[in-house]
Image (cartoon, grey):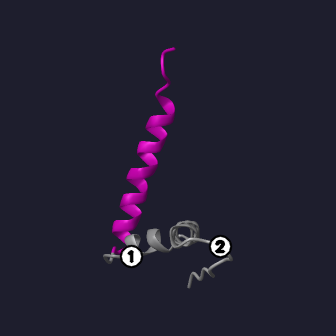
Amino acid sequence: MTVVILRNNESQDQLLKRFRKKVVKSGVLSTVRRKRWFVSKSEQRRMDDKKAARRIKRRQVKPTE
């Protein structure tokens, strides 16, 4: 759980900004988005294979500059 304590002379906007940064850095939102739907192991493996293939293809294509 992410906790942010109000500092002396700190506005609510600054407090909220610090809280948002901590939440993003902790990875809570990405975990929630990833676990929003159930994905079987075989489906996850297929998605990982496709992702790896795209990554390899992108690395092989070099810009002509």
59, above or below 53, in the image: above
Q: Which residue sits at x=56%, y=66%?
A: 21
Report the disc number at residue 45.
none
Q: Which residue sits at x=38%, y=70%?
A: 33
Marks 2 and 1 close (CB-CB < 8 Å): no
Magenta-drawn segment? 39-65
Q: Is residue 36 magenta?
A: no
Chief secondary structure of the magenta span?
A: helix
What is the three-letter code of the residue carrying label 2? Asn
Residue 35 horizontal side relative to residue 25, left or right: left
Q: Is residue 57 magenta?
A: yes
Residue 65 percent location from the top left of the image: 51, 14
Q: Return the residue found at the far front.
A: 9
Report the disc number at residue 9.
2
- Tell me the quadrant of the picture where the N terminus can be found: bottom right
Q: Nearer the viewer, residue 47 or 21?
A: 21
Q: Which residue is mark 1?
A: 35
Q: Secondary structure at mark 1?
A: loop
